[in-house]
C-alpha cells in the first residue's frame, strides 16, 4: 500500500523529534529537532527541509531552509527543480555548486563594496597630483570644474560603468557656450578615467578620449569661435573712469585702482602680499607659483602705485584684505563695478585697455609692451633678443600709463 504524501496540515502538527519523508518528490524530508531556545513548551521544535540525493554512488544531504519560512509547496518546488535541473543531469554536486555560487556572490558583493564612483576617483586623482601642479589655483580649477559641471551628472556613477553617452550629457550643455571650460573638463575627466584604468578599477577604452571617441560626436570649434574676449574700457575713457573710481570707498576700489595701474591679472592683484613689494626698487615681484606662465614677474611701480600702497600700509600678509582679514574675492570687484553701473566691462579687460593705448599712442616696442603684460614672446629669435626684462624701459612705460590714467578725459595720443 502506497504511503500517503504528507500534507501541509501534517507538517504543521508534527512536533515529535525525527525525520519525515514528504513522499513527493523522492528524497525530500522534514527534519524535526529540539529547539535551542529556552521554552516552557516541550513541543517547541525546529523544522527544517532536507533533500537527499546521490552523487557518484554516495548519498548527500542538502538543506533547503526552515519551516514555516518555506512552506511545503515551496519546498517541493525547490526540491523538484534541483532534481530535474541540469546540475543533477550533468552529475554536478548541488552542494558544491551552491558553495561556488555563494562564493561568487560574495566576490560580487565585495567588488560592489570596493567600487569607486567618479567623484571618489576624481578626489584621489587630485590629491595624488596636487603636489606636481604649479600652483594652488590650478588645483582649485580642477576641483571647481569637476564639482560644478561633472558631479551633478556622473559623480555618483561607478567609475567602471561610466559610458560615452553619460560623458556627453556633461559636455553637450556647455560645449558651445563655454567651450574653453568644456574642453578642459573633457581632458580632466579623461585623465581620471586613465588613472582608474591604470589602478585596475576600470577596463576598456576611455569614453572621454577625443581622438577616436568624442571627436566625431562634438563639433570641433575653431579657436576664433571659441575665444571670447573680456569686455574692455576704450582707452580714451580711462581718465573719466579713474575719476569715478576715486569717488568709491573701500578696499575693493583701491584693489581695482592698483590693478589698472599695474596691468596685472585679477588673481595676481587679489593675492598680492606686502612681502612681494620692494619699495627701495619700486618693484612688485610676483613669485612664479602665482603666475599663469609659471615664471617670476617683476612690475615697475609708478609714483601713483607707490602712493596707493603707502595709503594702505605697509603691513603683513595680503595687501587688499577683506573685513575678515582674508584676501578680497573676485566678487568684491564685481560688486564694485555693479555699484558703478559698469557691468559692461570686466577687470581683466583693463589689460586690453592698456595694450590698445600702448600700441596706438606710444612708440614703445612690442617686446616692452608684451613684457609689461607678462606675455611670452612667441618668436624664438625675438624672445632670445629680449631675454632681459627691459626694466628701465618698462618703468618709463608704466609711469606714462599711470600719468595717462589721471589725465584729462579727452587727452590726445602723444607718442612717447
Image: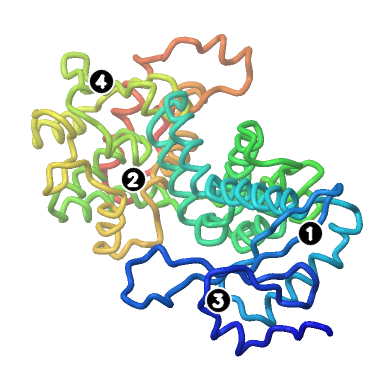
Quarter-wise, where is residue 353 in the image?
top left
Position of residue 50 measured from the top left corner of the image (x, y, whole percent): 66, 65
Q: Gap between marks 3 and 2, in whole Å?
A: 95 Å
Q: Which residue is mark 1?
A: 53
Residue receiving disc 2: 411
Choose the circle earlier in sequence order: 4 or 2.
4
Which residue corresponds to mark 4?
283
Task: Give the distance between the C-alpha atoms of the residues marked 4 and 2, in whole angstroms.
Answer: 28 Å
Q: Is residue 156 left or right of residue 209?
A: left
Separation of residues labelled 3 and 1 (CA atoms): 23 Å
- Would you call the spot at circle 1 few (<14 residues within 10 Å), some (14-19), or many (20 or more)? many
- Judging depth in this view, the residue of 358 and 341 nearest the camera is 341
Q: Nearer the viewer, mark 4 or mark 3?
A: 3
- Residue 45 position within the rendered picture, expressed as x and y whole percent measured from the top left: 46, 72
Which one is in front in this view, the residue at disc 3 or the one at disc 1? 1
Q: Name which of mark 4 and mark 3 comes first in the sequence.
A: 3
Q: Which of 73 and 1 lies nearest the eye of the viewer? A: 1
In the rendered view, would you say 317 is above or below 385?
below
Reading the image, the residue beneath label 3 is: 69
Horizontally, residue 408 falls left or right of residue 154, namely left
- Characterize the local packing of mark 2: few (<14), some (14-19) or many (20 or more) Cα atoms within 10 angstroms: few
Residue at the (31%, 41%) spot, across then down: 260
* First in residue order: circle 3 vs circle 1: 1
* Residue pictured at 30% horizontal, 51% vertical: 409
Amino acid at each position: 500500500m502506497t504511503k500517503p504524501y504528507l500534507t501541509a496540515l501534517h507538517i504543521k502538527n508534527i512536533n515529535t523529534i525525527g525525520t519525515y519523508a514528504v513522499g513527493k518528490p523522492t528524497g525530500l524530508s522534514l527534519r524535526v529537532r529540539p529547539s535551542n531556545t529556552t521554552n516552557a513548551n516541550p513541543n517547541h521544535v525546529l523544522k527544517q527541509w532536507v533533500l537527499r540525493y546521490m552523487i557518484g554512488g554516495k548519498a548527500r544531504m542538502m538543506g533547503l531552509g526552515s519551516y514555516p519560512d518555506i512552506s511545503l509547496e515551496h519546498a517541493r518546488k525547490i526540491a523538484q527543480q534541483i532534481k530535474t535541473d541540469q546540475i543533477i543531469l550533468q552529475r554536478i554536486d548541488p552542494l558544491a555548486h551552491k558553495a561556488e555560487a555563494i562564493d561568487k556572490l560574495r566576490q560580487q558583493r565585495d567588488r560592489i563594496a570596493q567600487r569607486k564612483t567618479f567623484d571618489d576617483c576624481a578626489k584621489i586623482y587630485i590629491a595624488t597630483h596636487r603636489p606636481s601642479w604649479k600652483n594652488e589655483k590650478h588645483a582649485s580649477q580642477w576641483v571647481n570644474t569637476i564639482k560644478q559641471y561633472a558631479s551633478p551628472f556622473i559623480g555618483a556613477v561607478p567609475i567602471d560603468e561610466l559610458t560615452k553617452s553619460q560623458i556627453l550629457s556633461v559636455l553637450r550643455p556647455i560645449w558651445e557656450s563655454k567651450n574653453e571650460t568644456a574642453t578642459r573638463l573633457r581632458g580632466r575627466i579623461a585623465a581620471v578615467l586613465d588613472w582608474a584604468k591604470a589602478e585596475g578599477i576600470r577596463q576598456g577604452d576611455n569614453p572621454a578620449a577625443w581622438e577616436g571617441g568624442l571627436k566625431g560626436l562634438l563639433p570641433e570649434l575653431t579657436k576664433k569661435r571659441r575665444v571670447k574676449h573680456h569686455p574692455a574700457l576704450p582707452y580714451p575713457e580711462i581718465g573719466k573712469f579713474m575719476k569715478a573710481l576715486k569717488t568709491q570707498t573701500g578696499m575693493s576700489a583701491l584693489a581695482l585702482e592698483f590693478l589698472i595701474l599695474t596691468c596685472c591679472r585679477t588673481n595676481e592683484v587679489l593675492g598680492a602680499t606686502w612681502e612681494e613689494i620692494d619699495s627701495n626698487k619700486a618693484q612688485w615681484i610676483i613669485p612664479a607659483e602665482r603666475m599663469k606662465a609659471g615664471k617670476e614677474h617683476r612690475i615697475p611701480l609708478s609714483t601713483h602705485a607707490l602712493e596707493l600702497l603707502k595709503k594702505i600700509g605697509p603691513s603683513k600678509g595680503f595687501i587688499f584684505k577683506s573685513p575678515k582679514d582674508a584676501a578680497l574675492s573676485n566678487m568684491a570687484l564685481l560688486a564694485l563695478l555693479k555699484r558703478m553701473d559698469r557691468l559692461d566691462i570686466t577687470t581683466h579687460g583693463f589689460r586690453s585697455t592698456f595694450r590698445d593705448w600702448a600700441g596706438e599712442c606710444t612708440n614703445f616696442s612690442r617686446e616692452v609692451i608684451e613684457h609689461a603684460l607678462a606675455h611670452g614672446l612667441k618668436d624664438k629669435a625675438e624672445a632670445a633678443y629680449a631675454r632681459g626684462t627691459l626694466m628701465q624701459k618698462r618703468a618709463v612705460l608704466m609711469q606714462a600709463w599711470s600719468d595717462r590714467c589721471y589725465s584729462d578725459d579727452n587727452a590726445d595720443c602723444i607718442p612717447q
